[in-house]
Every structure is written in structure tokens, then in C-alpha cells.
Image (cartoon, rainbow, N blue to C red):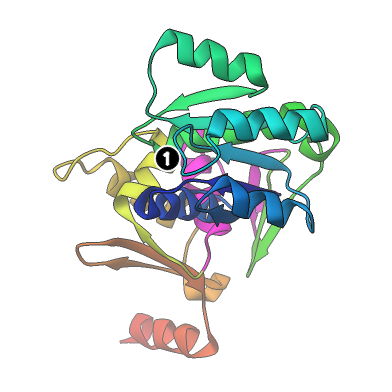
Amino acid sequence: MRIASVEDDPDQAELIRQILSEAGFECESFANGADFLRALRERAYDLLLVDWQLPGTSGYELVSWVRQKSGNMPPILFVTSRTAESDIVDGLTVGADDYMLKPIRAGELIARVRSLLRRAYPEAAQEVELIRRGNYIVDTHARTITVGGEPALLSPREYELALFLFRNTGRLLAREVMEQAVWGRAMGAGSRTLDTHISRLRLKLALRPENGVRLTSVYSHGYRFEEASAADVEADEAGADA
């Protein structure tokens, strides 16, 4: 799914792009409404995220224009600091489908985006996504993970964490991003919740090079989940024999 984000604050724009990219979405950022409208002439987007306060054309005016020209599609989510009830009512009345207040929370943003996409594209939501890594198959429709053809017994939270890892293979994942994506909030420096769930996944899914993957802890940052190379398998076997 291709998502457009219109946000003039560079830090906020990068945060939105990072959160959505790590959740498996393609996100293109625009610093103002004019740049977005120029891009809209050449390509379509499945979802639009809009800040209210933008240079030049306001987010309110941008949403109004899109609705007049494009009808009910694509779904639109306001992401803004304007908290007054009248602003929320005006934003929804002009044509937005949902309204989210800053500061941005990764779990909430992903949940709202997925909810809007499910409602707007119900047929796509029913498509089965199969993720294959080594000896693993993740079936997102059935919410199951098999290892060498055998189903793994996971709790709902363990499944969500595993799915996040498999969708972000090869990326360095910050602890805060993982916690926001799975639990909807950052746990804090003293929490061991994430590490406990990671330990359970290592055992239940046998996350080892012999099964085609490698999960490593990155000091002071988070974790990296990646496909294992032949050298990784040899090193793991040598370590087991030592």
C-alpha cells in the first residue's frame, strides 16, 4: 500500500515515514500541499496523512480539495496538534476519515492506518500474505507461523512480535519502535518485557541459523533479525560442537 504524508516538520515527517516503513508500508513524504498536489497528477495513493498547519495551503484546504476532485478515495487521516473539539469536528466534516492527535505514538498510528485501509479496501484486506524466511512460513490471514511445516504455539502478543520481526528482516530495530509497534507504548529503560518475549520466541520458533534466520541483540539499541548465511550456519554448528 502506498501512503502519502504531508507534514512540514522534518523530524515529524521522518518519524511517520520510519514507523510506516517498518510496518511494511511504502510512505512518501511532502513538506507542503503544493508538492503533494503536483505528485498527485502523476501517481495515486492508497491513503493520505495530513497535518493541519502547513505552509501555504492548510491541511483543511488540502483535504477539501482532494475530496472535491477525488471523491471518497483515498481515505484521509489528520495527524495534528489541534486538540479543540471544534477542530476535530471540522476536520471530519470537510472529508477526513479519522483524526489523530500528536505526539505521534507508533502503535496508534499503525492501528489507525490499518483500520482505514481495511475499511477502504476490504478485498485487499482478505488477501493472504505469506512471508517465507528459511524454514518459516508466516500466514498473516490465519495468524500462524510454521517451522519446518510444524505450527508454533504462540500467544497473541508473541505472534505480533514475531510478525513484526519477519516483516522487518534485515533492519536494525530500536527497542522503542518494537515496543510501540507491538504494545502501543514504550516500556521504559528498566522494563524487561520485550527481552522476555524475545527469549520465548527464540525457544518456541527455534530462531537459529540452521533454520535460516539469525536474531541478534544490538547493545544499547535493540535487535536485528536477518536471514542467515552459510557462514552463520557453519559458525553455529562449530559452536555447538565445541
Q: Position of residue 88 (x, y in %)?
A: 50, 15
Whether residue 40 is situated above or below residue 95 in the rendered picture: below
Q: Position of residue 122 (x, y in %)?
A: 81, 30
Q: Quadrant of residue 184?
A: top left
Q: Quadrant of residue 67?
A: top right
46 to the left or right of 199: right
**In which quadrant of the rendered image does the C terminus lie?**
bottom left
**Is residue 130 visible to the viewer in this orientation of the structure?**
no
Give yes or no for residue 146 being in the magenta stretch: yes
Q: Identify the residue shown where x is 62% and y is 35%.
A: 62
Taking the image as shown, residue 125 lies to the left or right of residue 210, namely: right
Residue carrying label 1: 106
Residue range (magenta)? 142-169
Q: Is residue 51 visible?
A: yes
Taking depth in this image into account, of 199 and 117 the one nearest to the observer is 117
**Residue occupying the point 37% across, 31% down:** 102
Q: Residues within 10 Å of mark 1 (few under 14, many from 20)?
A: many
From the viewer's side, name the closer residue of 203 and 182.
182
**The one of 88 and 18 positioned closer to us in this rendering:** 88
Residue drawn at (53%, 49%) of the image: 32
How far from the left and from the top, in percent, is residue 73?
A: 78, 33
Asked if residue 239 is positioned above or below residue 156 in the image, the reply reads below
